[in-house]
Image: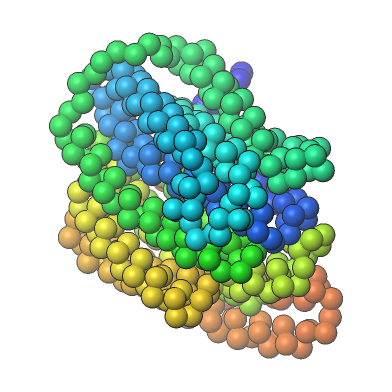
Amino acid sequence: MVKSFLRIESYKKGIFFSSAFHIVARLFTFLSSLLIAYYFGTQSKTDVYFYSYATILLIAGLMTSIDSSVLIPESMRIREQVGIEDSRKFLNLFLYFYVFIGALITLLFFINPISTFILISNFKSAVLFENKDLLNLAILLITCIIVSTFLVDILTSYKFFTIPMISQMINSAFTIIFIVVFNNIYGIKSILLGLLTAYLIQITLLIWLMIKYLNWNFLFKLYKIDGKVLKNIFFAQAGNITTTLTSYIPLYLLSSFSAGVITALNYGQKTSDMPNQFITTQFSSVIGIKFNELFAKNNFKRINEIFYESAKFLLYILIPISFLFFLYNKEIITILYGRGKFDEDSIRITSLFLKYFGLLLPLFAINTLTARLFMASQKIKEAVFYQFFFNIFLILLIISGVKIYGEIAYPLSLLLAYIFNVIFMYYFIKKYFDYINYNPVLIDFIKFVVLNIVIGIVIYEIKFLLQNTNVYLNLVIGTLIYVLIVVLLSYYYKIIPTFNTLLNFMNRKIS
């Protein structure tokens, strides 16, 4: 019974159950963010925490970024074409490699954590000395995150679609427990203590599942890696380095700003990213596995159908959410975080970040689906060259923008770069995936944006009329009217596909 609950054979059920669990997991994560904001507000200590944890996540993410782009697709190919045992030897080899690299990085950080973070951040040395314990605890997470992520990816490739969400729930649950129970004793360190405990439990659980339900043998055995795989890893990491830099450089630049800016950036970005995590990431992770299978069968017609309908579905959902974030940024942040130690100044700067980060949602969706195409088709070299030049362009925008216009230039630089990305992707897909019809995606994108601009103007006027009312009432009324207009226009003029059409597609195509 446990196995049937964890391992879901149908992709339709996989999307449903993983999405449901993902919502619960993200709600847990969101609750932990609310508690951090309530107990600690925005100050230099929270800046150091978010900076150190984000840096560790970037390092771990860089290491494991080849999982979905190279290692998992290759292991699935070996499993289908060579055999299960060879696939497991292949994955075990990289598991032990990850353990070794993670331990080595941890050791290098531990030699002199203060000097290391002085080198990789713009914080004043006094601030880092004051929070030395935070840095040490964050460093201990590196190997745990790398190993846990890889084990989760392996289980997901075996259709254990709920495992990623269960792992997230464990992380968030222990974070919440440790903040509530130990915040008076350990302060902000209680967050990292909770995360360390959670990751250790996670790894133990994942290993147990693999042994019990997959009969996994973790004994190390040498396995000859195909030259093409090594080449793909090289090219993938070359592109991933620049992607990592696009996240790291803003943190580095903003760490020199006044206390609380990095914390506000985190809250604004994480709040805007919630729909992306709830919808795009979860949806595309299952679609990505489906793409892997369809490319293995050379079923290009089905790939085109799923790509277009998936893009249409995501744009339909995410563009209205983006406009609501833009219109009601302050109201949303006030309702979510405006209590405890989260003061008016914290609300002001966090709202500004949310306002512009929210507009990225539909752009990220198209980029994510396109990335899944390149991963599944193993066009790593082609993707890396594009990724490299795009990230260089983005990095230059961020550096020049932040230096001239301050912290708000970061989300604006992202917005400009990803608009260019969506347009240029037309030529890129036409060159490498001539069986993918990208034109309808662009047409739907433009059509939905224009429609939502018109609706947004109406909602702005309503918001202005209700400006002296309760903040909750203003947001609820505006959102309900917005959704009602979208649904009515869709129904009467067929401007946007209805939910029923989309759900029928999901039922028919993804199963």
At x 50%, y 61%, the residue is: 122
Up the image or down, 264 lies above or below 56; here it is below
Toward which corner of the image does residue 482 lie, by quadrant? bottom right
Toward which corner of the image does residue 267 lie, by quadrant? bottom right
213 displayed left or right of 429: right
Is there any visible trace of residue 275 in the rendered image? no
42 displayed left or right of 435: right
**Given the current orientation, which residue lies at the most extreme left position?**
227
Up the image or down, 317 lies above or below 419; here it is above
Residue 420, how many percent across, how many down?
A: 33, 72
At x 72%, y 51%, the residue is: 36
Q: Nearer the viewer, residue 159 or 41?
A: 41
300 displayed left or right of 494: left
241 displayed left or right of 494: left
The quarter of the picture where the N terminus appears is top right
Residue 307, how many percent across, how many down?
A: 36, 54
At x 20%, y 53%, the residue is: 382
Q: How is the image coloured?
A: rainbow
Up the image or down, 147 lies above or below 504; here it is above
Q: Nearer the viewer, residue 506 or 479?
A: 479
Q: Nearer the viewer, residue 457 or 236?
A: 236
Residue 138, how many percent across, how many down?
A: 56, 40
Is there any visible trace of residue 455 in the rendered image? yes
At x 51%, y 42%, the residue is: 113
Up the image or down, 114 lies above or below 495; here it is above
Q: Nearer the viewer, residue 216 or 373?
A: 216
The quarter of the picture where the C terminus appears is top left
Toward which corner of the image does residue 416 lie, by quadrant? bottom left
Residue 234, how many percent across, how many down?
A: 23, 42
